[in-house]
Image (cartoon, grey):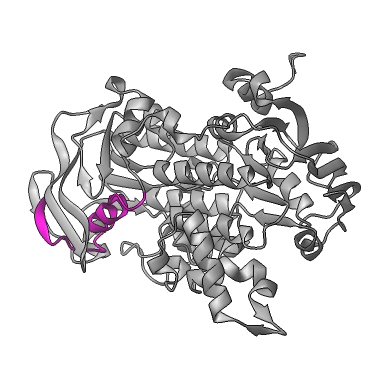
Amino acid sequence: MTSGAPLLEMRSISKSFGSIRALDQVDFEVRHGEVMALVGENGAGKSTLVKILAGMYAPDSGEIELAGRAVEFSGASQSEHAGIAVVQQELSLVPTLSIADNIFLGDTKRGWNTAPRVLALAAMPFLAQVGLENLDPRGRVERLTVAERQLIEVARLLARDARVLIFDEPTAALADREIERVKSVVQSLQYQGRSIIYVTHRLDEVFDLADRVTVFRDGRSNPPVSTGDITLDALISMMLGGSLAALFPDRGGGRPGEVVLEVSDLLTDRLSTPVSLEVRAGEIVGLAGQLGSGAGDTLRAVAGHETLLSGSVTVAGRAVRANSPAAAIRSGVGYSSSDRKRDGIFLQRPVVENLTSPSLGLVSTAGWLSRRAERRMSDRIARVFTIDRARLGSMAGALSGGNQQKVAVGKWTGSRPRVLLVDEPTRGVDVGARAEIYSHLRSIAGDGMGIVFASSDTQEVLGISDTVAAFFRGAQVSVRAREDTDSRLLTREITHPRTDGS
């Protein structure tokens, strides 16, 4: 399906924001019927390029050609009229409108007074393409899950009869089943002859979907490379300047200390069988499983965010009152959720306040906040987690995804909990920030903290865990020392652990 001629070509594109050079003489192209992957660390310039194509930014210099004709976009409508459609990285749906309204929002081919029944019927084929045919198109978006909303974004893209389709991190918040839906949509669109730009941090998707890949680094572009001519390790090296092995810190040879967390026969309505775990001081325990496997639900239960049907949680020998996040925190448990923007950080508050928010008792006296103590604590956490201390006064929402995640995790270390629980520690985070987060987790474990994290990334679990627990469909399948498992065994346990042919 792929033609050798570029459908879209960008040459010598530069864009600056004040003194920050976001794009520096970037070249980029996508051919007719091609899936071109676009990868790079946060801040490499990928989002800026996408926004230029979407008409949200104008380049400072350079030229863009579409189907052999020079184009300039001074707004999103011009980009759409030219045949470019984007699934944005940040969900842009209107929660109070219906699914059908959102799918056709901004579609000038339809009148503003089109009957809801007509819109609903028109939306159904696009919902079916993303596996949401069971949804009522007249239902409001605010009632949908995050995964369903992301798929609605894809359905909205399908409703635009565009020549160039841009998927900007479409699977960051999706489980495996939804990811496969998105992949199927991409392959179908390519079969129809559409050109696709696929921006992702999930490097396995690059090799599954893309014909070629373009790597951005520090605002500059590398020449595109065929995915058949590059390995995963070589791709990471182009992005980072280091190898795959460099992602994960040395686990060291130290022996874990005393038991700091004991989970005995824990059961909630989201778990199908009881869960039991022990975590020692200085130990990192990885809970491996797909979204919905029970790994993340186990963390939520230990942190007091789920109702316990039975079982107990003990921290440093003392029982923790069930179903109480406040009691868990007082007992020495920190919890970083999988959705940092919803409940991990305060986007509209300064970084300094975010970093000290779980430790207000340590930075105040008799209810009066000490700005000096607040600054001192946030400065210490920022140094440990390599957060730019010059940006402590900036709003957390202005940080890159990687730095937001470092704030979401790092803020819990201010009160020095005995146990830190982290759900999906690197979701939506680029390779460079992943390496930093792994190093920080190993460092604070080395200081004697027990760490438990849940992840759907088996490479991540195997790379930083001392002990690995596998989960499948709400059940704890196994608990093993890292040395006693490997990628093949772990993948089988979290995808289809049964051996009876069922």
Name which residue lies at 21% across and 35% down. 32
Q: Is residue 54 magenta?
A: yes
Extreme-right residue of the structure: 310
Please provide the residue range marked out in magenta.
42-65
Q: Is residue 306 visible?
A: yes
- In the picture, measured across the screen, residue 188 lies left or right of residue 412, that is left
Quarter of the image with the N terminus is top left
Name which residue lies at 60% across and 48% down. 444
Name which residue lies at 71% across and 32% down. 469
Where, by quadrant of the figure, is residue 274 drawn?
top right
Say above or below: 175 vs 109. above
Name which residue lies at 63% across and 59% down. 412
Extreme-top residue of the structure: 500
Say above or below: 47 vs 298. below
- Residue 21: x percent and y percent? 20, 59
- In the picture, measured across the screen, residue 13 lies left or right of residue 152, that is left
- Residue 294: x percent and y percent? 73, 40
